[in-house]
């Protein structure tokens, strides 16, 4: 809980929790005035500089960082592990593709060649008479009959 009373008396103990580590700071009277002595023995001129030292050099607002001893929030309990999720079943059928949107995607789709499906029966045509054949080889042999005299 942030410090609201900024007139701290010597002997006041401040506490803070940073990265799951509890730190303490005591307000002491020295020849130079009030100082904030950390639990490691270093003395600082303000709660902010003491908080900065407690956090390892990260600047902070000491009045918000420190709490009066006994008024801080309780430590958080570790989260309980969630039960394992059941595995997903195999996918049923693939979803149908959405039609191409107007713009570049439509132009790309329009320019693609027709892809053969397993149900499609291939057919090859003769350029001379238009007859259709089941294989390319048969269509070529037929087309050659039109050109030879």
Image (cartoon, rainbow, N blue to C red):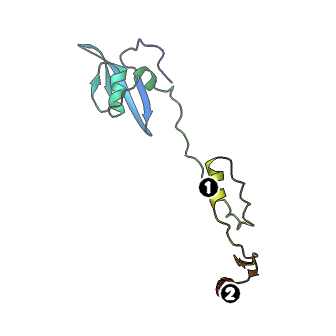
Task: Tell me the quadrant of the picture where the C terminus can be found.
Answer: bottom right
Q: Nearer the viewer, residue 108 or 69?
A: 108
Q: Nearer the viewer, residue 136 or 144?
A: 144
Cα distance between the residues tagged 2 and 1: 39 Å
Q: Is residue 139 above or below residue 19?
A: below
On screen, residue 103 versus residue 8, left or right, reads right
Q: Which mark is residue 145?
A: 2
Q: Which image quadrant is residue 17 in?
A: top left
Of the image marks 2 and 1, the number of the one nearer the N terminus: 1
Q: Nearer the viewer, residue 59 or 24?
A: 59
Which percent across, then down, holds residue 43?
Answer: 28, 24
Q: Is residue 67 above or below residue 23?
A: above
Camera sees residue 83: no
Residue at point 28%, 30% (across, down): 41
Which percent across, then down, holds residue 112?
Answer: 63, 62
Q: Which mark is residue 108?
A: 1
Camera sees residue 119: yes
Residue at point 40%, 24% (across, down): 13
Which percent across, then down, holds residue 36?
Answer: 33, 22
Which percent across, then down, holds residue 148?
Answer: 64, 87
Q: Is residue 24 above or below residue 29?
A: below
Residue at point 72%, 64% (across, down): 94
Q: Which mark is residue 116?
A: none
**Could you say whether the residue bearing mark 1 is in a helix, strand or loop?**
helix
In this rendering, the label closer to the viewer, 2 or 1: 2
Number of numbered labels in the structure image: 2
Q: Residue furthest front?
A: 149
């Amino acid at each position: 809980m942030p410090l609201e009373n900024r007139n701290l008396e010597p002997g006041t103990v401040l506490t803070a929790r940073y990265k799951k580590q509890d730190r303490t700071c005591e307000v002491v009277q020295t020849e130079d005035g009030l100082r904030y002595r950390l639990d490691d023995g270093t003395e600082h001129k303000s709660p902010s500089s003491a908080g900065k030292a407690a956090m390892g050099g990260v600047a902070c607002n000491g009045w918000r960082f420190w709490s009066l001893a006994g008024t801080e929030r309780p430590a958080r309990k570790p989260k309980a592990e969630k039960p394992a999720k059941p595995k997903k079943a195999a996918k049923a059928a693939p979803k149908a593709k959405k039609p191409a949107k107007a713009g570049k995607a439509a132009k790309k789709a329009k320019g693609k060649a027709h892809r053969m499906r397993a149900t499609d029966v291939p057919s090859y045509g003769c350029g001379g008479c238009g007859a259709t054949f089941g294989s390319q080889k048969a269509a070529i042999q037929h087309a050659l009959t039109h050109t030879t005299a």
